[in-house]
Image (spheres, rainbow, N blue to C red):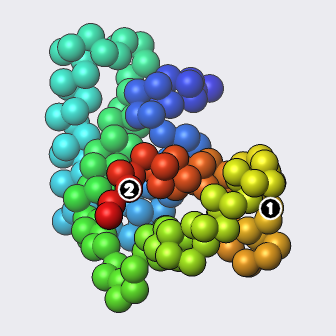
Amino acid sequence: MYDERAIELLTGLTAEQRAALGELYARLDEELRVEVHRRQRELFKEWLALGRVAPSRGGEAGYAAFLAVLKQVWIEQSPQVLPQIRDHKPYKKRLRNALEKNYLDELVRLREEEKLSWRQLSDHFKKEFKKTVSHTYLKRIYEEHLAEPKGL
C-alpha cells in the first residue's frame, strides 16, 4: 500500500496530472529518460538532506521526485506559447467605441429620463441594439461620461 496523499503533497499534482506525466515519460527518448532518472536521484537526495521526506517513505518520495523532474522536463520541453496577432481591435475596445459613439445619448436619456436601473439598461441594449453589455460596464461608461469636463 502506498500513501497517495504524500505524493500529492510533495508534487502538488493531481492523479490526472500524474497520469499525463507518465504518458509524457513514455514518449521521451532514452537519453532524456536517463537524464530524468539522474535528476530524480539528485532531487531525492536533496529532499532527504533537507528533511522534507522521512526515510520510511522512500518509495513515495522517490516517485514524487520522479514526477517533479518530469514536470520540470515538460516545462522545459514545452514550446513557448506566442500570443496570436489579431488584425482587428479587441471586442471590448470596439464595444466601448460603439457605445460612446452611437449609444451614449440613448444611455443617458434612458438613465436620466426613464430612470431605468443598470440591469434594465443592460437588458434594453441587448433587446433593442443586439449589444450584450454588462450593467457594471454601462455604469462605468456613464460615470466616465459624466466626469468628463464639458468643452466649448
The single residue placed furthest to the bottom in the displayed view is: 87
Residue 150 marker:
2
- State whether residue 72 appears in this view: yes
Q: Residue at x 25, y 40 (%)?
A: 40
The amino acid type found where label 2 is placed reads: Lys
Residue 123 marker:
1
* Up-down relation of residue 52 to residue 5 (above or below): above
The quadrant where residue 107 appears = bottom right
Q: Residue at x 41, y 27 (%)?
A: 10
* Up-down relation of residue 42 to residue 78 (above or below): above
Tell which of 71 and 37 is nearer to you: 71
User: Dot 1, crowdedness within 10 Å: few (<14), some or many (≥20)?
Assistant: some
- Report the quarter where the N terminus lies: top right
Tell which of 13 and 124 is nearer to you: 124
Residue 87: % across, % down: 35, 88
Q: Residue at x 35, y 51 (%)?
A: 149
